[in-house]
Structure formats: structure tokens, C-alpha cells
Image (cartoon, grey):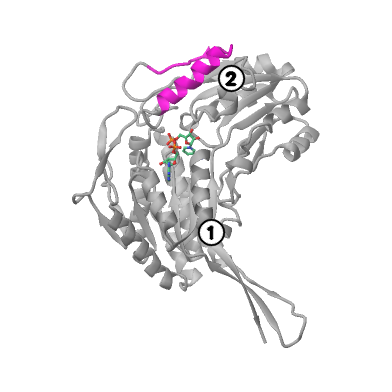
């Protein structure tokens, strides 16, 4: 029922065969789903050699050839969505409808990259002398190493793989060991779509060991990571020491500003549903709620009502709206936030604890009355916890929203065009959503500022991190 797990190196799927293995756990039940083989040091060297060799040919492949493979992957993604989604719910925990949505949305990512990779243009710069021709060429950077996390295992991996391959790079991907099935599905699709051996390689292992080996290797020219800020900083520092380019999609702590003039019940309902999506394990999840005085009571009432109605359960059950946390270590992480909130004088208005059942379930939780320096207001909870706070002066709310080192996503609810315009300019954030949630589409850029990252994925920017610029001047 679950996915066969393997390494994918130089076009071959490699199983356990004496390699160290780790259990993959179903977070809804705690049961073991399968064993994931870890790459041995010689496997990593083989993946590096394969990616280097394949780059020699793939860099000269035509954009039409790359586009055809990416289109084929989009098609396979749609055809296989049901099986991939089921396995994703089994190892990651999110409700089946969310898994299905992730796979279908990613088919669109593959299509977008298939279209855009045919439009990687250089330019001609008019020269100062008539006999000179000046050309700017955009070339693939080389072998890439990518590291993707467990919250959107399909989405985060396919965007990096499509961008690298579409640009003419080759790639070694280390996916999330906790939830590996989606990355296995990606490897199988590219294999079946006819991608030449070595262009995509998938490895598993102890994350710090794999990333250290790959980033230090002189073969790797670019590093792309999605995950937490502390790990991102470590990997960016190592990449910097070896003068390698990076794309960093890191965490945030997304402020929500609800103004008195907003459609408050609508905002409360939308935000409650968005908060529990993927059990709050979303880098752009709304995580700091600042509600203007005149809207506060009405917002809180509807927000709590909506969260009370959320059906929590096994993601495979048809009526489940929020699944478990993706792994056991996230439970004490949630408890730490709630304990600190209580110690800091906060009031737990809803939930606050684990659910008494097998699996790694935590209740939708709302906390009010916290000081701005409480843990929940300063550190990304990455779970189904919402701290709610008041504001009177809009400028004060904007100052508080910008007061943390993060800058990934921000949310504003207002009926005033002036307030919307001012907030969108004032917020220090890579993404600003006003009166709805509209981020992470293939055709729009996604990325953070400040500690939340470097570079964008998606949009026409999507290949920027995988290309280098060469200037050629000729008489
Ligand atoms: P973590 O910081 O240990 O790991 C986060 C991710 O980075 C995991 O996928 C992990 O495998 C990977 N990782 C860790 N160390 C690595 C290394 N040295 N080299 C390469 N990859 C490495 O924490 P966790 O318990 O897995 O997740 C909790 C935190 O991670 C959350 O609080 C959240 O802030 C962050 N996170 C962010 C995202 C995102 O989309 N930005 C996704 C998942 C987790």
C-alpha cells in the first residue's frame, strides 16, 4: 500500500542492500510504514560523479527537450495524483484532500517551468564601435544540491527540481527522511518521462552529514534549501565559505493585521481555516494576529467558533479537516509554546494540549493576552497555535509586525484602499496578501526577505538562481 523506498542515482533505483535504514512512521497512528535506505559515503560520491557527467550533456540540451520532459512530468503528476496523495497522507499526515491539492498544484508548477524554460533569453548590448558585437548569455550554473523539508514534500521538491532541470542544470536532491514518498514519486516520474541518467539524483541520510558532503564538494556549484532559519544560516555560511550560490526559502512568523473597517467575520473564518491547514505546519501560516480594538471581540468570537468546528483526525478519513503533526518531536515543541504562554500571563482561549489518542495530534489552540516578547510572538510556532493580540494605532501595529528578524508573508484585512496601499508598502515581507490568500502559485514569485531567505522560486524569477551571466564581446 505504501511506496517502495530507494535512492535514485545515475538513473538507477537502489534499495537497502546492506545500507543503514531508518523507519518511516505514520504520524496518525505511530505505525511503521517502511524502511528508508541511507546513502553511504560512496553513494554520495557516485551521485556527485553522475551529476557532473550528466551536466556535460544536459547543459547543451535544447529548451524544447527540457520542456517536453517537464510537460510529461506534469501529465504523470495528474495521472498518478491519487496514489501519490495517499502515500503523502500516510507519511506526512495531512488530510487527503490537501495532499491531492498539493499534487495537482505541482503539476501546474511543472507546466509553468516547461513554458518558461523556453524563454531563458540573453541580450545584445549596443556597442561603442560598429565592428564590435556585445552579447549577454545566461548559462546553467552547474550541479545543484537541494534540501527539502517535510511539510510540503512534493511542492518544495518539485519546484527546485523543475527550476534546475529547466535551466539546464543537474541536481542532487535530499528530501525529507520523515516523509519520503512524494520525493520518491518525483524521481519515478522523471525516470518514466525519459530524463537522462544522472540529471536528477535522490539521496537520503543524516541531513547534516549529507549536506556537509555535498556543499563542500567542488562539483556542486549551487545550493538550494527550504527549511528552518537556523539550518538555513548554517548551510548558507558553508556555501559562502566555498563561494557557492544559494537560494534559501526559510521560515517566517507571519503577522496578520485586521483593521476595524475589515469584513471581520469573513476574515475570522478565512484565517481560522488557513491556520489549521497542514496543522499549521506551513512557512506562510498566519502566526501573529494583531486585531484592532473595534474588531477584536467580533473577530475572536467567530475565530474561536470556526476553530471549534474543525474535525481533527486521521488524514485518510474522509471528513478529516486537520491531521496530526508530522512527527512526534513537534508535540513537545507545541507544549513549550503553551507553557511559556501560561508563564507569561497569557490566557489559553481554546485547546492547549495533545489529543488523547494514538498518533501525534495537537488541538487547535488560541492564546490571548501575551506580551510581545513571549515565545509565541517571537518564534515561529509551526503548528496549530494562534496568539491573538490587540492594537489601537495602525502605525504601532505595523511597527510590531516588522519588529522581528523574519519577513516571509504578511496578511492585511481592511476595506480601505488607502490602508491596504500603505500597509503593502510598509510591511517588511516578501509576500503581502490583502483580504485573501494568494501566494505560492507557479506564475508568481515566492520568497522571503530579512532572515526568511534569499531568492525567489516561481514566477519569471524562477530560473534566476540556476543561471550565471556570461558577457561575450567580439569583433
Ligand atoms: P529542523 O530545523 O531540524 O529541520 C528543518 C528541515 O531541515 C528538515 O527537513 C531537516 O531534514 C532539514 N535539515 C536539518 N538540518 C539539516 C542540515 N544540516 N542539512 C540539510 N538539511 C537539514 O527542524 P524540524 O523539527 O524538522 O522542523 C521544525 C522547524 O523547521 C519548524 O519550526 C520550522 O521553522 C522549520 N521548517 C520550515 C519549513 C519551511 O517551509 N520553511 C519547513 C519545515 C520546517
Query: Which residue, given by chain and number where applicable, does mark 2 sit on?
Result: 303
Query: Which residue, given by chain and number where applicable, does mark 1 sit on?
Result: 243
From the viewer's side, name the closer residue of 66 and 281: 281
Secondary structure of residue under mark 1: loop
Q: Residue at x 58, y 30 (%)?
A: 286
Q: Is residue 18 above or below residue 113?
A: above
Q: Left or right: 435 with respect to 93?
A: right
Q: Left or right: 33 with respect to 167?
A: left
Quadrant hosting residue 258: top right
Q: Position of residue 337 (x, y in %)?
A: 50, 21
Quadrant hosting residue 181: top left
Q: Residue at x 58, y 14 (%)?
A: 344
Circles 2 and 1 in contact, beta carbons < 8 Å: no
Compute the Cα span from label 2 to label 1.
48 Å
Extreme-right residue of the structure: 418
Q: Residue at x 78, y 28 (%)?
A: 395
Mark 1 is surrounded, within 10 Å at the Cα level, by few (under 14), some (14 to 19) or many (20 or more) other residues, namely few
Q: Left or right: 35 with respect to 326?
A: left
Write down the region rendered in magenta. 330-355
Does the stretch in magenta take in 336? yes
Q: Is mark 2 within 8 Å of ligand 1?
A: no
Which quadrant contains ligand 1?
Answer: top left
- Which mark is in front, 2 or 1? 1
Q: Which mark is residue 81?
A: none
Q: Position of residue 111 (x, y in %)?
A: 50, 56
Q: Quadrant of the N terminus?
A: top left
Q: Left or right: 332 with respect to 348?
A: left
Q: Quadrant of the C terminus?
A: bottom right
Q: Position of residue 247 (x, y in %)?
A: 54, 52
Q: Position of residue 458 (x, y in %)?
A: 56, 52
Amino acid at each position: 500500500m505504501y511506496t517502495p523506498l530507494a535512492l535514485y542515482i545515475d538513473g538507477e533505483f537502489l534499495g537497502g542492500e546492506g545500507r543503514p535504514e531508518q523507519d518511516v512512521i505514520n504520524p496518525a497512528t505511530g505505525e511503521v510504514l517502511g524502511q528508508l535506505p541511507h546513502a553511504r559515503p560512496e553513494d554520495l560520491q557516485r551521485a556527485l560523479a553522475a551529476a557532473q557527467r550528466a551536466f556535460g550533456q544536459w547543459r547543451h540540451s535544447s529548451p524544447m527537450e527540457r520542456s517536453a520532459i517537464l510537460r510529461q512530468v506534469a501529465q504523470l503528476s495528474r495521472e498518478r495524483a491519487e496514489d501519490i496523495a495517499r502515500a503523502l497522507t500516510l507519511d506526512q499526515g495531512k488530510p487527503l484532500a490537501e495532499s491531492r491539492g498539493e499534487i495537482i498544484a505541482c503539476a501546474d508548477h511543472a507546466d509553468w517551468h516547461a513554458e518558461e524554460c523556453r524563454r531563458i533569453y540573453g541580450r545584445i548590448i549596443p556597442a561603442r564601435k560598429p565592428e564590435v558585437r556585445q552579447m549577454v548569455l545566461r548559462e546553467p550554473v552547474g550541479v545543484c544540491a537541494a534540501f527539502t523539508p517535510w511539510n510540503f514534500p512534493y511542492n518544495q521538491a518539485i519546484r527546485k527540481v523543475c527550476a534546475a532541470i529547466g535551466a539546464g542544470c543537474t541536481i542532487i536532491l535530499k528530501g525529507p527522511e520523515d516523509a519520503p514518498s512524494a520525493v520518491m514519486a518525483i524521481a519515478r516520474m522523471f525516470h518514466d518521462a525519459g530524463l537522462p541518467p544522472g540529471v536528477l539524483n535522490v539521496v537520503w541520510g543524516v541531513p547534516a552529514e549529507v549536506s556537509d558532503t555535498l556543499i563542500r564538494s567542488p562539483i556542486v556549484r549551487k545550493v538550494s534549501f527550504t527549511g528552518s532559519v537556523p539550518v538555513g544560516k548554517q548551510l548558507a555560511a558553508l556555501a559562502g565559505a566555498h563561494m557557492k550560490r544559494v537560494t534559501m526559502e526559510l521560515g517566517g512568523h507571519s503577522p496578520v493585521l485586521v483593521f476595524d473597517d475589515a469584513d471581520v467575520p469573513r476574515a475570522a473564518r478565512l484565517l481560522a481555516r488557513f491556520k489549521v491547514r497542514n496543522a499549521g505546519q506551513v512557512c506562510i501560516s498566519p502566526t501573529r494576529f494583531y486585531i484592532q480594538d473595534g474588531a477584536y471581540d467580533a473577530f475572536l468570537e467567530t475565530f474561536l467558533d470556526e476553530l471549534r468546528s474543525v474535525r481533527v483526525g486521521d488524514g485518510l478519513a474522509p471528513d478529516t479537516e486537520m491531521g496530526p503533526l508530522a512527527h512526534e518531536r513537534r508535540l513537545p515543541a507545541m507544549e513549550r509554546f503553551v507553557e511559556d504562554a501560561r508563564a507569561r500571563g497569557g490566557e489559553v482561549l481554546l485547546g492547549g494540549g495533545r489529543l488523547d489518542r494514538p498518533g501525534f495530534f495537537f488541538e487547535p489552540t488560541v492564546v490571548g493576552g501575551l506580551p510581545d516578547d513571549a515565545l509565541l510572538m517571537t518564534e515561529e510556532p509551526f503548528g496549530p497555535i494562534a496568539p491573538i493580540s490587540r492594537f489601537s494605532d495602525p502605525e504601532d501595529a505595523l511597527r510590531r509586525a516588522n519588529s522581528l528578524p523574519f519577513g516571509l508573508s504578511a496578511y492585511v484585512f481592511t476595506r480601505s484602499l488607502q490602508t491596504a496601499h500603505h500597509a503593502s508598502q510598509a510591511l517588511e515581507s516578501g509576500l503581502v496578501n490583502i483580504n485573501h490568500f494568494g501566494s505560492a502559485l507557479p506564475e508568481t514569485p515566492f520568497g522571503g526577505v530579512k532572515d526568511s531567505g534569499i531568492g525567489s522560486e516561481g514566477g519569471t524569477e524562477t530560473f534566476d538562481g540556476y543561471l550565471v551571466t556570461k558577457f561575450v564581446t567580439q569583433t
